[in-house]
Amino acid sequence: MSKLIISVSGLRGIVGETLDPLIVARYAAAFCAHAPAGPVIVARDGRATGPVLRDALTAALRSAGRDVIDADVAATPTVGVLVRHLKAAGAVQISASHNPPAYNGMKLFGADGRVLDARQGAAIRDAFFQAEPRWVPHDQLGGLKHSGDPHTPHLERVLQTVDRPAIEQRRFRVLLDSNHGAGALLGRRLLETLGCQVMVVGETPDGLFEHPPEPTATNLEGIAAQVREANCEVGFCQDPDADRLALIDADGRYIGEEFTLALCVQRALQHPETTGPMVINCASSAMSEALGKRAGVPVFRSAVGEANVADLMIEKAAVYGGEGNGGPIDPRVGYVRDSFVGMAQILDLMQSTGKTLAELADAMPQYAIHKTTATVPAEQMPQVFDAIAQAMSDAQQDRLDGLRLVWDDAWLLVRGSNTEPIIRLIAEAPESSRAVALCEQAAAVVQRAILE
C-alpha cells in the first residue's frame, strides 16, 4: 500500500510520503467546493500525526471560506452524530482506520451525518485531481471554534436503544481495549453509565498502539489473556477510530468481528421496533441471514463498504444493518458503523437472555469462513471473473461487487483489491473443508486463466 489510496468516502496514505499537508489542503478544498453551505466539523482518531494534519486541514477549510468546528479526538460514529446535532454542512474525520501507525487519512461526511456515497465521493475525487483549489480573500476567511463536549449526543442516542436500568443491575465486569485510539473517550463513559466495572487498556488517545491496530485474533492474543486473567465477562476491542468492534469471551476466546453484527441482529429481532428488513454486505457471514430467515425477516446484501450498506438500508427501509467487520449500523443512532452500539446492545442481549457471551456465540448458526488471495494484474481481472463464473456455473451468480457465487450450503466472493494487483477470495460454509475447497477451486481457475 505505497500509493495514496482514494476511495468513495476519503483517502489515506503514508504521512510524509504519499500524504502531506499540501494533499490535505487540496482535498479539503475539493470537499468544500461540493459541500452545502455551513460549518465543517474536524475530528481525529488519536494517531500521533493527527494534530499536524488537523492544523493543515483547518487552515485549508478556513482558507476556502468555511467556519470550522474542532471536535478534537472523537470516534468516527460520534462525528456522524455530531454533524446532525450541530447542523453542520459536513465533517472530515482524520483517520486511517486499522492501518499501521505510519498511515493517516481523511474520511468525509455529508450534512446527513453519513460517510459520502459513491456519487459524492467521485465528484470530490475528480475535483481533487482536475481542479485548482479556490481560496477566498482575506476578509472572507472562515472562523474556528471548539465543540466543547462532542460525545454526549452520541452517548444519549446509544443509551436510548437499550434497557439501561436492566444492564446497570447486572454490573458486568468488562475489559475495553481502545489501543490508544479514539474509543475510550466515549467507551469508558458509556460502559460506566451502564453500571459496568470497567478495565480500560490503551485509554490515552495518543496513537502509540500496544498491538497492531486491526482487531484480529492474532493481534489480540495479549488482550485475550488479560480478559481471562482479570475475570472479565467480556472483552470489547475497538479499532483506532472505533467504528469496528471485536469480541473476546470470559475464557479469553476470540469470538471475533463477524459475531458482533450477528449478535446485534439477534438482539434486534427480539424487539418489535427493530424487527424488519435488514442489510449486510456481500462479504458478511451468513449468520445474520440465517437469523433473519428464522424470524421471517428479509436480509438484503449490498456491495462492500459502509456507504453501500447505508444506501441500501435507506432504499429498503431497513431497521438494522451493518458489516461483518464488526460494524453494526442502527439507524436510530446513525448510518455509520458503530462500536458503541455494538457494546451496549450486546450487553443488553446478555442481560435479557441471562447467557454468557460464549453461550450466545455457540448458539449461533455455525459457519466457517476461509480467506485467501491470488495475484492478478488489473487488466486480467475481467477475464478471471468470467473464467471462475464459467467453471463454477452450478451456483447462483451476481456481479454486484466483483463476483459472488451462492450455493444452497455455501457462498464464494471474488473481489479485486483497490490497492494491489490481487483478488481476494472469501468463502463460507458450514464446514471449514468446504470453504477451503471453494477457495482452492477458484484459485486454480485463476492460475489457468492467467496462463492462457
Image (spheres, rainbow, N blue to C red):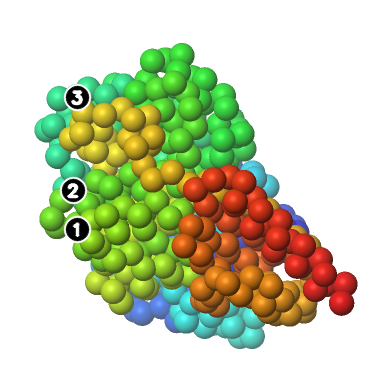
Residue at 36%, 42% (x, y): give it.
Answer: 364
Give the residue pinned by disc 3: 170
Dot 1 and dot 2 residues touching (CB under 8 Å): yes
**Amino acid, disc 3:** Arg
Between the residue at mark 3 and the residue at mark 2, the CA separation in whole angstroms equals 19 Å
**Amino acid, disc 2:** Gln
**Amino acid, disc 1:** Thr
52 in relation to 10, above or below: above
122 in relation to 361, above or below: below
First of labels 3, 2 by sequence position: 3
Give the residue pinned by disc 1: 275
Q: Position of residue 348 (x, y in %)?
A: 22, 37
Residue at 31%, 53% (x, y): give it.
Answer: 291
Give neighbour class at mark 2: few <14, some 14-19, many 20+ (Cα, 10 Å).
Answer: few
Dot 3: element: helix
**From the image, which quarter does the C terminus lie in?**
bottom right
Query: Which is more toward the observer, 258 or 116?
Result: 258
Give neighbour class at mark 3: few <14, some 14-19, many 20+ (Cα, 10 Å).
Answer: some
Which marked residue is nearer to the observer: mark 3 or mark 2? 2
Query: Which is more toward the observer, 443 or 11?
Result: 443
Give neighbour class at mark 1: few <14, some 14-19, many 20+ (Cα, 10 Å).
Answer: many
Give the residue pinned by disc 2: 270
Give the image quarter of residue 277.
Answer: bottom left
